[in-house]
Image: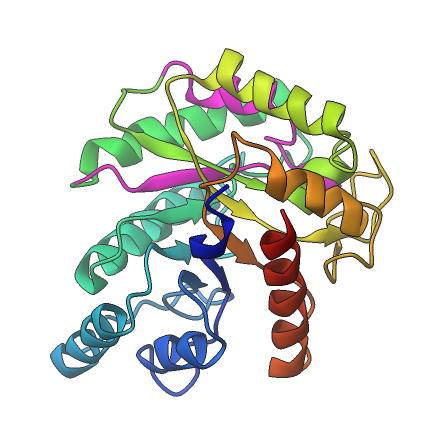
């Protein structure tokens, strides 16, 4: 197992300047990282100036932090039946990809959407239509689709639903997939067991091939198995548990996948503890 050299990181804040996110990640010993490229709860668009871009790019290179992931805005709902929100969501995700490209980032992770008052099949159709439009304008293969917990009408909580969304899209539209362990557990995949992990991997290969699994959001779950509630917990403190993460991290088909922790955080100390535990598990595999 090549665990010791595995890429492990967290979602870091861009507060005070986007380049500071890299310094925060480096201070934590991260070798990969994830950011919001702008305020994820605002429709306002802002492009960094040339100095900010250069600082960010240089720090990423100097500190050998790769890959870097952008997580798309929480406001985006590609499934929306409301015409204005649907178009704003497409436009915002396009902006996310443009901003990532400017920063030298080649991966934007997004959630497929939420069915609000409409059927899941209609929501899936709306997301497909949105992505089809979006992918006509995106300059490079950059989008990574993330599974959801299935909370409050979220679509994409199963690999089957993700497959429905992406199956008829052009091959260059979606770069790959992101699996959030807390979301997967809450949606019914028992990642505390080898059998549950294997089931998820087999579904990905059977239903989504040749799309690759490019990143794991490594989070424990406050929600019980199949609870369909999106609540992250510290590694080893939730229903997946420390032994569950040992099984996940030791699985040969997951051994080279970059890990991004999105565990609860009140201070850097929380990230330090969660990262330390993950590294400890990796070292003992």
Q: Position of residue 192 (x, y in %)?
A: 78, 38
- Whether residue 142 is in magenta: the answer is yes
> Colour mode?
rainbow
Closer to the camera in the image, 122 or 73: 73
Q: Position of residue 244 (x, y in %)?
A: 76, 42
In the shown orientation, is residue 270 left or right of residue 190?
Answer: left
How many dots with numbers? Answer: 0
User: Along the horizontal axis of the image, is 29 left or right of 47?
Assistant: right
- In this picture, is 196 found above or below 46? above
103 sits left or right of 86 in the view: left
Q: Specify the farthest residue to the bottom.
A: 16
Indicate the position of residue 169 as horizontal and vertical percent values: 34, 20
Q: Which residues are magenta?
A: 140-168
Q: Residue at x 77, y 39 (%)?
A: 186
Task: Examine the rendering and report whether any part of residue 194 can be seen.
Answer: yes
Does 45 lie within the magenta span? no
Foreground residue among 200 and 133? 200
- 29 or 96, nearer to the observer: 29
Q: Position of residue 24 (x, y in %)?
A: 44, 80
Q: Residue at x 68, y 36 (%)?
A: 184
Residue 276 vertical placement versus 213 (above, below): below
Residue 135, placed above or below residue 58:
above
Which residue is nearer to you in this view: 236 or 94? Answer: 236
Indicate the quadrant where residue 21 lies.
Answer: bottom left
Which residue is located at x 32 percent, y 26 percent?
132
- Asked if residue 149 can be seen in this view, the reply is no
């Amino acid at each position: 197992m090549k665990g010791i050299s595995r890429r492990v990181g967290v979602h870091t804040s861009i507060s005070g300047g986007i380049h500071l996110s890299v310094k925060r990640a480096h201070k934590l010993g991260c070798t990969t990282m994830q950011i919001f490229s702008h305020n994820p709860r605002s429709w306002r668009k802002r492009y960094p100036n040339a100095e900010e871009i250069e600082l960010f790019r240089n720090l990423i290179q100097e500190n050998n932090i790769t890959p870097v992931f952008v997580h798309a805005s929480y406001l985006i709902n590609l499934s929306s039946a409301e015409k204005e929100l649907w178009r704003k969501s497409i436009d915002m995700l396009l902006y996310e990809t443009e901003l990532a490209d400017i920063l030298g980032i080649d991966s934007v992770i997004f959630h497929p959407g939420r069915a609000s008052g409409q059927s899941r099949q209609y929501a899936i159709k709306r997301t497909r239509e949105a992505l089809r439009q979006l992918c006509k304008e995106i300059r490079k293969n950059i989008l990574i689709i993330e599974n959801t917990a299935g909370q409050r009408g979220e679509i994409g909580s199963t690999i089957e639903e993700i497959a429905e969304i992406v199956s008829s899209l052009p091959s260059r539209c979606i770069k790959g997939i992101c699996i959030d362990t807390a979301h997967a557990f809450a949606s019914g995949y028992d990642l505390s067991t080898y059998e549950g992990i294997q089931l998820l991997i087999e579904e990905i290969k059977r239903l989504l091939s040749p799309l690759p699994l490019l990143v794991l959001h490594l989070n424990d779950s406050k929600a019980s198995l199949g609870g369909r509630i999106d609540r992250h917990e510290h590694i080893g403190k939730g229903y997946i548990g420390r032994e569950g993460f040992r099984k996940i991290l030791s699985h040969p088909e997951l051994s080279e996948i970059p890990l991004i922790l999105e565990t609860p955080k009140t201070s850097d100390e929380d990230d330090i503890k969660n990262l330390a535990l993950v590294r400890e598990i990796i070292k003992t595999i």
